[in-house]
Every structure is written in C-alpha cells, then in structure tokens.
Amino acid sequence: MTTYDLEIRHPHHHSDDEAEFFEEMSAEEIMEKFNGMNWKQLQILMLQMRGGKAVFTVTDNEQNLAVQISLIEIPETGALAFNFDSDIEVEVERSNLFGLLKYSTVKDAAFQHLNLTATRDLLDAFTHGELEAIRALYTEQHASLAE
C-alpha cells in the first residue's frame, strides 16, 4: 500500500516551518483531511491576513511525485477555486510558428481555477495512482486551449 506525506499550510503560518506535517498517510486519510478542511473559512482568513496562503501538499515518496493544491484568494466567481500543481510529467505536442513542424515537449501537469469537486477528483486520482487519468485530462485541456 502506498503511503503519502502531507503538508498543510494555513494563512496564519508565516513560514514553511509552521506548517502542519503528517507522514505515512493512506489515500483515505489524505482524502479525509482534504474533505475536512474548512476551505471557505480559510479563504476568508486569507483575505484578512494579507499574504497568507492555504496550501495542501501531498507527496508520494515511492514515485517521488507531489501535488500542491492552493486555494485562490479572490476567485473569478463567488465559488471556491483552486490551483493544482504537480510534478507529473506530460508529453505535449507543439507546433512551430507556421504550424509546419511539430515537436514534443515535457511539461508538469497543472490546472488553474478548478472548483472543489474537480480538485477533489484530481487529488483522488493522484492518491490512487491514476496518473494516466491526470495526464489525459491535462492533454485534453491543453489541446482545447491550443485550438
């Protein structure tokens, strides 16, 4: 069974040393922690404490991969919004300026302005080793942005 390390940084934590750190957690425990976070309250706290951040970082030490979920302080809509950054490598096809040549480049999968449900689904996929699903979603989003 894969275990994960978890680091939670609240807006009132002024340095990384103050963050909460949990070792060797199961996928279910990670999801319990994520679902137990009072994200709306953290968003309000972020607005009150300028420069404060709410960050949820999960590390898979076996595969040497991590995801970092950060709450957006002032989202474009009234709903909660998150950025999902990872070091899950994805091969992306690119074209040159004239579209004549295509080449591949490797990027880290990252998603911006996700709602709570989409963020939860990506975290669940990561903790259950479904990295190909994350890569496919990133590739799909990247392709639609390129059009």
Image (spheres, rainbow, N blue to C red):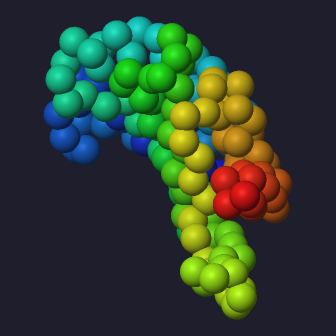
Q: Is residue 123 above or below residue 82?
A: below
Camera-nearest residue between 30 and 49: 49
- Residue 42, x across and y down, in percent: 39, 16
Residue at (69%, 81%) from the top-left corner?
Answer: 99
- Quarter where residue 117 is shown: top right
Q: Is residue 47 left or right of residue 127?
A: left
Please, is residue 65 above or below residue 2 in the view?
below
Q: How many marks?
A: 0
Q: x and y percent of residue 83 in the render?
A: 51, 40
Residue that appears at 19% across and 18% down? 49
The quadrant of the rendering that contains the N terminus is bottom right
- Can residue 97 be seen in the rendering of this structure? yes
Residue 65, position as x, y percentages in the image: 58, 63
Q: Name the residue rendered at 42%, 29% in the picture.
A: 72
* Of the pair 43 and 19, the residue shown nearer to us: 43
Q: Quadrant of residue 133?
A: bottom right
Asked whether the viewer can see residue 131, the reply is no
Between 90 and 93, the residue placed more toward the observer is 93
Residue 139 image offset from top left, x and y in percent: 75, 61
Q: Relative to 49, say whether 22 is above or below.
A: below
For this rendering, which residue is in front, 2 or 143? 143
Q: Quadrant of residue 13?
A: top left
> In screen coordinates, is 92 left or right of 111?
right
Side of 39 where 88 appears, left or right: right
Q: Quadrant of the C terminus?
A: bottom right
State the residue at coordinates (31%, 31%): 53
